Image: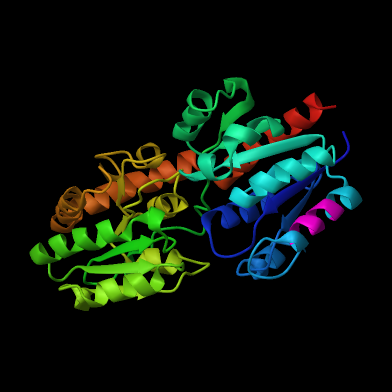
Amino acid sequence: MPRIKTVLLLQDLLLGGTQRHALELAKRLNPERFDAQIWTLMGGDDFLPTARDYGLNVRQLATGTGVGPAGLWGLWRALGQTRPDALLALTVVPNIWGRVLSRLARIPAIIANCRGGDDLHRQHEAVLKNLAHHHICNARALKNSLMERYGLPEVRIDVIPTGVDTAHFTPRPELREEDPVILCLARLAAIKDHETLIRAFELAHAVHPRARLRLVGDGELRDALSRRMADSPARERMELLPGTGNPAGEFARASIAVLSSANEGMPNVFLEAMAMGLPCVGTAVGGVPEVIRHGRTGFVVPSKRPDALADALVHLLENPELRQRFGEEGRRIAVEEHSLESVAARHARIIEDVVRARG
């Protein structure tokens, strides 16, 4: 079989879990079987140095800070010039326009991805689901929604959990800060519900004044969150830092990883934290209960409940032995169930199967 010309279509190469996932996947697709390329619809090149280090073929279809006519025209031209055998659409906008234009260009195999808790609605699955020949989800909860809410047949959906580079994300206890750090590494967006986390930390801080809350990320709510933290009675123990393309250092310095999201797919941040040997606390949304084993690697609490989140954080702050036990179990699960090699192999098999089925 000749090499399968495969395009991974992204909106951009800005900092983000899906962007990192795409790079790691493209890096591990066997070059004897796949001619893998990454295309982006707009500017944003935080991960471009990493892509170059990996030796990946990256094609920026347009520049600028948003997806517009130039990016869509660039995609249409590239589809006609390159004629890929398979297109994997990643992130919301590529899942919309990648499907529409690939169908018009008669691309043989179109594979949609659902990775975030609100992706199904935002990428118009009700209208576009049948423009993809196959769907890949990173959580069972998303697969169930595609079947139950949108009527997609189970045979056209696969669940592949998010992978993590367990050689890069490895425990570094010697770097952990003396005062326990509660780390939230997430986009500064409404769906991440940082307000619930800040309120929970205020409650936990009253019991454990030495604890610190560290928010790391970029997004439209930076100014609002900065003002909210400045007005907090716990403001001296909270900090807001820019996003980073290599978060291993942040995990190494932390004691607990947390997300207070209102919606999620399967968060990369928890897998990376588990690989680094950290206990995790998350809300019971999307695929979070699939990645955090409640009572084994951390705690899952109801969303929008700062009191419940605070109780979980306090319990971990009071029990360093429990933090260590949860961290060790999380590391074991990350290594055994979420290796990047197994994730890439499963993607490769699906791409080959869909291309073969489509002739």
Residue 268 place in picture, x, y as percent: 47, 51
Residue 197 place in picture, x, y as percent: 26, 58
Residue 166 place in picture, x, y as percent: 49, 52
Say whether residue 327 is visible.
Answer: yes
Q: Quadrant of residue 294?
A: top left
Q: Which residues are magenta?
A: 71-77
Report the front residue among 197 and 278: 197
Quadrant housing the N terminus: top right
Report the front residue among 128 and 339: 128
Say whether residue 29 is visible.
Answer: no
Residue 163 place in picture, x, y as percent: 53, 46
Question: In the figure, is residue 200 to the left or right of 68?
Answer: left
Report the front residue among 81 and 32: 81
Q: Quadrant of residue 290?
A: top left
Q: Is residue 232 above or below residue 74?
A: below
Scheme of image coloration = rainbow
Q: Quadrant of residue 41?
A: bottom right
Question: In the figure, is residue 211 to the left or right of 352?
Answer: left
Dominant secondary structure, magenta: helix
Quadrant housing the C terminus: top right
Question: In the figure, is residue 148 to the left or right of 29?
Answer: left
Magenta residue check for 184? no
Tell which residue pokes out farthest to the left in this image. 207
Magenta residue check for 76? yes
What residue sits 64% from the left and 64% below the top? 66
